[in-house]
Image (cartoon, helix red, strand yellow):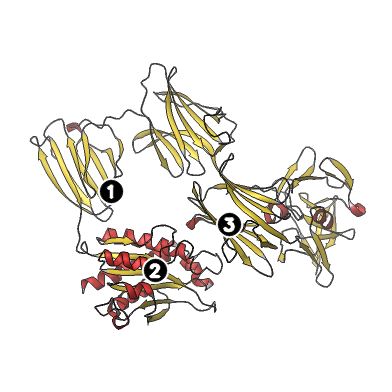
Amino acid sequence: MKKIAILFVVAFLVFNVVLNAPALIFADKAGYVKVHMDGKEVSLMKVNVEINGQALESDVPPLVYDERTLVPIRFVAENLNAEVNWHQEEQEAVINALGKEIILKPNSSQVIIDGEKKELPYGVPAKIVNDGRTMVPLRFVSEELGCSVKWDQETLTASIQAESQEVLDIDVDMNTDYPRVVVKTSGPVLYNTIELGDFNKLVIDIPNSTLNIEDESKVDTKGILNLEVEKYPIKAVRSSQFKVDPNVTRIAIDLDNLTDYEINYLSNGEGFEIKFINNVSDVVAEEIDGNKAIIIKNSNKVEYSSFVLQDPNRIVIDLMSSNYDVDKYEYEIDDELISGIRVAQFDHDGYYNENEKVVRVVLDIKENAYMPEPQIETIDNNLVIFLEDKDFSSIDYNTLESDKGSLEITGLKETDYDVVYDDEVNTMHVRMPKDNIEIDNGKLNIDDDLVEDITIKEDGEEKVFEIKLKKNIEYTSFEKNGKKNILIVMEYKNKKYGDKLIIIDAGHGGKDPGTTAINSKIHEKELTLMVAKRLEKKLNEIGFKTYLTRDNDEYIGLYERTDKANSMDGDAFISIHFNAHNNPDVKGIETIYCPSYGSDQKTEDQYPFAETIHSAVVDAIGGIDRGINRRPEIVVTRESKMVAALVELGFISNPEEEKAILSFDYIDKAVDGISEGLMEYFDK
């Protein structure tokens, strides 16, 4: 991800003035290093530097020169999110931070701050060591940017501490160039970012800060902020006091997908903004599944609008909340339809919201060429425009019911054909001699409840129709009009578990986050929903019918969950949870059930079901077996009429188990275990 932050900075930096310059340092005795400076080798004492209690390390350590500590510039860019540039021609390092520009020249006792020349304290200039690293005076740069510096003579450590600040407001602004989250603080702050791609989450920690939202309507009784947004790409923003002593405020931004972003300090120095943008990087012509296509390469999934203009003919695609920072306006495309492509940041003249940032892509159609009807798909964040006028008239697909469809293939004459269905990958292949049918190669996107798409291609002397299915099916093929027409009727295969309805309960949700992971701070409700959705998909593939008590981040009451399950006459109830304990060493898997004598709803023994599920999950995951526990007070297992079990899939309070849980491999093993347990139970 691209992170550009003009941010509050403690200034110790390393900057590579000469690319690939050697960084040769030799220790000649404890606490000293030899470096090249001013054309000669010198021995300087090395010291330690900490920022907010975190020790900083570098291939070039902080050094004492002329009784003053010099530190490398790289720390600003790598650790404090500032923007640092080296101007080779002027031989100067430029630091942009806190709305302030600081220019330092090696061997000069002067510094330029926002255009004003000043003398460096004690006359100690910036220096270049080892022919490529710029070192600057620690105390001057730190204090210039509002930090305090303390020196510990015993450990030879300089401690840099940012001033304590309050986070006063967090808001979402969808009415500017790009969607953004605005964080307002009482003064300059530092931040650290954590990207959780598997969960489409961006986490921002603000050290040495306390959460004190001035608008009390934004926070709950515990002082936790929760903003439900649900506008692409931002789903929700949450914030809480993550740590106390030292104080850390944590902001978690839930996204539709983890997009590119920029972080910039506010002009008054009191807070920062996180902008979410799509960067358009290139436009290319490629062939996809036998179809010629124009591909607009994006960093993120993007919303777009498209339309056709005439005189001259052209196709226009506008990409919303997007940036085009490429020094190229026109693209030459060798195509029978397109004469060229133009791309630019669009000045929309009121067509869109005045603050909307739009990239316009224009496909110019050749004179006297027919105007194609574009088909646009999103593939791996990229927009793919199919333009060829494909002739697919020889096939006809119809959705008959939600789980039933028909495909009719019309040949030129009576033909032999072969139908092969692979239920392992849910794909059907229909083959016939290519001379017996007239149809272009290409791809038809169906996307109903049964069929994903149909790809037409050639394999030697055969024409192949590849039907990608969403579910296991059974089919019947018919011959019509002699053997000129082939009709294939496909229907969802009702396997032996097809009469079983499994209620899948993703624990917690909405205002009830459940427990919180010890390191990642992921809420239990997010993990349970991920497992529930994957379990639903797996059980559907096996043949079970399923119902999710919640399929998004919403609060559903416990009795509401069981009332729905009972009204649907479910055959089994599985509640998904993750565990926590005050002792971070505790880990393992346990299953909870309510004995029939502890419930007014139950009519059969619950233990065999709980035991079967528990054993299968432990075997699949390979975790510590914490056993099967009777807990009559648990509402969802007590009030559900059907057999029910609550599965605690591991302790997210245990660092080792948390790390495992946050992998898809662990989640998939848990899903496989529950699925195997259900099949084993209903097979008995």
Query: Is 97 situated above or below 484?
Result: below
Q: Residue at x 20, y 43 (%)?
A: 430
Question: Measured from the top left, where is residue 234 in percent x and y?
Answer: 52, 49
Depth check, front residue: 29 or 260: 260
Depth check, front residue: 12 or 493: 493
For the residue labelled by badge 1, is the local secondary structure a helix, a strand or a loop?
loop
For residue 447, which quarter of the picture? Answer: top left
Q: Could you give the CA–CA distance between mark 1 and mark 2, rounded to whole angstroms? A: 31 Å
Residue 334 is tagged as: none
- Judging by the rendered image, the residue that carries numbered circle 2 is 558
Question: Of callouts 3 and 1, which one flags the residue occurring earlier in the amino acid sequence?
Answer: 3
- Judging by the rendered image, the residue that carries numbered circle 3 is 218
Residue type for callout 1: Asp
Q: Residue at x 70, y 46 (%)?
A: 19
- Judging by the rendered image, the residue that carries numbered circle 1 is 449
Which residue sits furthest right?
122
Residue type for callout 3: Lys
For residue 626, which quarter of the picture? Answer: bottom left
